[in-house]
Image (cartoon, rainbow, N blue to C red):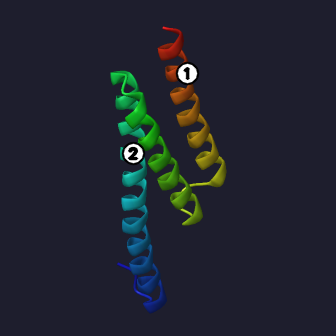
Amino acid sequence: MPRIKLANKIARATERRRLRNSTTKSRMKTAIAKVGKLIVAGNMELAEKETVKAISYIDKAVSAGVIHRNKGARLNSQLTRQLNQAMSKEKGG
């Protein structure tokens, strides 16, 4: 434990931020995993809707400062690319 009062306050604030960030990250990762499972299952209509939700969670994490904006852009791009590839395979199939 810190001896100095300010250091103690900073430690408490850091813990609050860590908990808030972990819930945001968890929600984001769960949404991304859900999209992946739907794509593998071949349920493209639901995958499209869940992709929109996942991108929204990613953007919220970026705006809250939980993840870097480049990582957010990369995740959005990867999700969209996976969905588009799966949809083109389904149509061309």
- Identify which residue, 2 or 83, lies in the foreground: 83
Q: Residue at x 42, y 59 (%)?
A: 24
Q: Judge from the rendering whether residue 38 lies leftward or rightward of residue 54; answer left or right.
A: left
- Identify which residue, 65 or 38, lies in the foreground: 38
Is residue 41 placed above or below 16 in the rendered structure?
above
Query: Which quadrant of the figure has residue 49?
Result: top left
Q: Amino acid at mark 1?
A: Gln
Near mark 1 (Cα within 10 A), the count class, few <14, some 14-19 or many ≥20, is: few
Residue lying at the far top of the rendered structure: 93
Residue lying at the far right of the rendered structure: 70
Q: Secondary structure at mark 2?
A: helix
Of the two numbered discs 1 and 2 in the rendering, the one whose residue sits closer to the viewer = 1
Q: Amino acid at mark 2?
A: Ala
Q: Secondary structure at mark 1?
A: helix
Instruction: Name the residue carrying label 2.
Output: 31
Quadrant showing the N terminus? bottom left
Instruction: Name the residue carrying label 1.
Output: 85
How far apart are the alpha carbons under marks 1 and 2?
A: 19 Å
Q: How many marks?
A: 2
Q: Position of residue 60 (x, y in %)?
A: 52, 60
Q: Residue at x 44, y 88 (%)?
A: 4
Near mark 2 (Cα within 10 A), the count class, few <14, some 14-19 or many ≥20, is: many
Is residue 22 placed above or below 31 in the rendered structure?
below
Q: Judge from the rendering whether residue 56 lies leftward or rightward of residue 74; answer left or right.
A: left
Is residue 66 placed above or below 75 in the rendered structure?
below
